[in-house]
Amino acid sequence: PPERLRAEYAAARADTEAALTADPSDAQARVIRAAVLCAQVGLGAAPATALEDALAELDRVVAAGGEDAEVRRLHGVCHRRRGQAMAQAGGDPGEEYERALAELDRALELDAGYASALQDRGCVRMLRSQVRPGAAALAELDGAIEDLTRALERAPGSADALAARSQAWLQRAAFSAASGQDAAATGRRGQPS
């Protein structure tokens, strides 16, 4: 239930606040605080404020020399969520999705086999396919399927990655039906048999 999640996030946030009071340079506490802020967006937290605070925490970690794949992945997730909030409000999420993709690309430069970053990048590509025209949308969906397949190679059986890839295939099939293209004829990796 949302009430329980809110209470758990509040407890996590209180602990990170205590950790940062004890040691303001604690990078791990800043990363966890950013993750909590980002996760709370779906539970009624004001997206703009929570995501700005999360990004500021992650920027502090990077400025202190703490850049790693997880920090960049979380940057990407925050930008993706900010884009989704913009889209829900009727705005143009394109720039936020571009930032998300750039951050996830950086995470994968730091750790090429990072399954969570591959999965997140696949999800961003699916979102980008919704705001791009024609062939560009199709290329995004193909990239999403490729990323999600690579994520599954590194984390076999991941329910989240499987669900995301099935969504990408569903979107691609809808695109193919609308445009008269045959998705099965493309020979993409991860294609269902």
Image: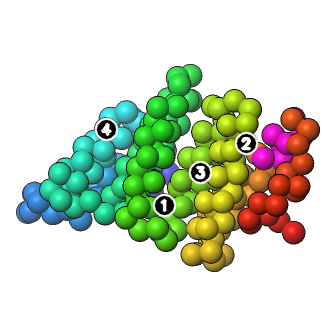
Amino acid marked by disc 3: Cys
Q: Residues within 10 Å of mark 4 (few under 14, many from 20)?
A: some
Q: Residue at x 83, y 55 (%)?
A: 186
Residue for badge 4: 52
The image's mark for residue 117 is: 1
Residue for badge 2: 138
Residue 141: % across, % down:
69, 47
Q: Residues within 10 Å of mark 3 (few under 14, many from 20)?
A: many
Which portion, as a residue range, is magenta? 172-178
Q: Residues within 10 Å of mark 1 (few under 14, many from 20)?
A: many
Q: CA distance from mark 1 to mark 4?
A: 21 Å
* Secondary structure beneath label 2: helix
Magenta span has 176? yes
* Secondary structure beneath label 3: helix
Reply above or below: 109 against 152: above
Q: CA distance from mark 3 to mark 1?
A: 10 Å
> 133 or 45: which is nearer to us?
133
Q: Residue at x 73, y 42 (%)?
A: 138
Magenta span has 185? no
Amino acid marked by disc 1: Ala
* Secondary structure beneath label 1: helix
Residue 72: % across, % down:
36, 55
Q: Residue at x 65, y 32 (%)?
A: 132
Q: CA distance from mark 2 to mark 1?
A: 21 Å
Nearest to viewer (mark 2 / mark 1):
2
Q: In this image, 78 relative to 68: left or right?
A: right
Nearest to viewer (mark 3 / mark 4):
3
Amino acid marked by disc 2: Leu
Q: CA distance from mark 4 to mark 2?
A: 31 Å
The image's mark for residue 123 is: 3
